[in-house]
């Protein structure tokens, strides 16, 4: 072989190695898109997704809007990941209709999609994995009404309109109160937009308008944090029965201190892990279930030191969020 032929052959081999060879060797990319990146809940989801990425040798791309009501930004992020031709999408929908066209595009590109935490109107997804939020709301209602002895006036700090997960749990809560506790009245309910400072404000408004309030249900972590701040600022901590949803470090301390009487807790770490796992299974040729329900747990101060509750509340975030 002549010198020029050898040079040409080497050039061809370099091109092949830089194209097809790299494509075969690169990790599959899974984009995980939460409702927002500011929530403690989604930090745990992120850690769980990264844990699954390590387990299944996947490259996890984490990207989300700064606010849970920034629907247009979530659409932009999802569309950018579709254009990037990622190998799978895991999405917590901020609004149940907003992503319909994006999910149509993902289906056309044959990109498998797992919807987690909060559902969508579209049927163009592979798997929906979430807490059974209707039942979780029922659990919250039974706990709060029991704490009140079946009598009293309560308020609900609502999350945000269009959020399927929180709407489901709010509806489950109201269903049980109306059906099973005739002595309990829901006298006020206001949306917080999934924002802690707004939740503080609407809680203060409801407390002002209803000075004889006996209890509060806060349907998400931002709602619960804002409600707690309002009660503490008014010197009402421990004077009303309060059930919150989810669990951050501050909320757990408030449970210990008696600001909350109970928390209804999901498992966001497992949710993030299993959302990625379903996509790993699909890429491996398996067929994941269309719907996967996760159960919530009611946690009181007395439960905090039990091993199973301690493991649920304190996942190893530092290990997976580097």
Image (cartoon, rainbow, N blue to C red):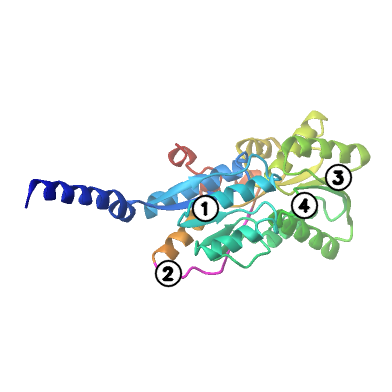
Query: In the drawing, does residue 118 fall left or right of residue 219?
Result: left
Residue under the image location 58 percent in, 52 percent down: 79
Q: CA distance from mark 3 to mark 2?
A: 51 Å
> Element type at marker 2?
loop
- What is the distance, in whole Å, between disc 2 and disc 4 at their CAs? 36 Å
Mark 4 lies on residue:
161
Highlighted magenta segment, given as a residue range? 285-297
Q: Which residue is mark 2?
A: 286
Alpha-carbon distance for marks 2 and 1? 25 Å
Q: Which residue position is annotated with label 3?
A: 214
SS under mark 3: loop
Residue at point 54% right, 61% down?
113
- Which tag is nearer the camera, tag 3 or tag 1? 1
Instruction: Tell me where residue 196 sits by quadrant.
Output: top right
* Distance of label 3 from label 1 (alpha carbons): 52 Å
Residue 68's spot in the image, x, y percent?
68, 45
Question: Residue 166, how many percent across, how many down?
Answer: 71, 54
**Gap between marks 1 and 4 measured at Cα:** 29 Å
């Amino acid at each position: 072989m002549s010198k020029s032929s050898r040079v040409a052959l080497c050039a061809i081999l370099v091109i092949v190695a830089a194209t097809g060879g790299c494509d075969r060797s690169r990790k599959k990319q899974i984009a995980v898109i939460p409702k927002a990146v500011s929530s403690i809940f989604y930090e745990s989801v992120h850690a769980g997704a990264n844990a699954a990425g390590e387990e299944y040798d996947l490259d996890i791309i984490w990207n989300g809007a700064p606010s849970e009501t920034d629907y247009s930004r979530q659409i932009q992020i999802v569309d950018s990941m579709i254009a990037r031709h990622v190998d799978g999408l895991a999405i917590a929908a901020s609004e149940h209709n907003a992503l319909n066209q994006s999910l149509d595009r993902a289906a056309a590109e044959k990109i498998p999609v797992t919807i987690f935490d909060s559902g969508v109107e579209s049927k163009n997804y592979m798997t929906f994995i979430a807490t059974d939020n209707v039942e979780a709301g029922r659990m919250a209602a039974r706990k709060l009404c029991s704490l009140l002895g079946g009598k009293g006036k309560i308020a609900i700090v609502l999350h945000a309109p269009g959020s399927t997960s929180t709407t489901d749990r709010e509806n489950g809560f109201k269903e049980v109160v109306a059906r099973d506790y005739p002595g309990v009245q829901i006298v006020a309910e206001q949306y917080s937009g999934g924002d802690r400072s707004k939740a503080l404000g609407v809680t203060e408004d409801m407390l002002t308008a209803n000075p004889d309030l006996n209890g509060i249900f806060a349907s998400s972590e931002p709602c619960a944090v804002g409600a707690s701040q309002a009660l503490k600022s008014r010197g009402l901590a421990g004077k009303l029965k309060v059930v919150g949803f989810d669990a951050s470090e501050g909320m757990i301390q408030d449970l210990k201190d008696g600001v909350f009487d109970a928390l209804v807790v999901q498992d966001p770490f497992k949710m993030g892990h299993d959302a990625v796992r379903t996509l790993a299974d699909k890429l491996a040729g398996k067929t994941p279930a269309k719907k996967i329900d996760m159960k919530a747990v009611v946690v009181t101060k007395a439960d905090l030191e039990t091993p199973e509750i301690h493991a649920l509340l304190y996942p190893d975030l530092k290990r997976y969020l580097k």
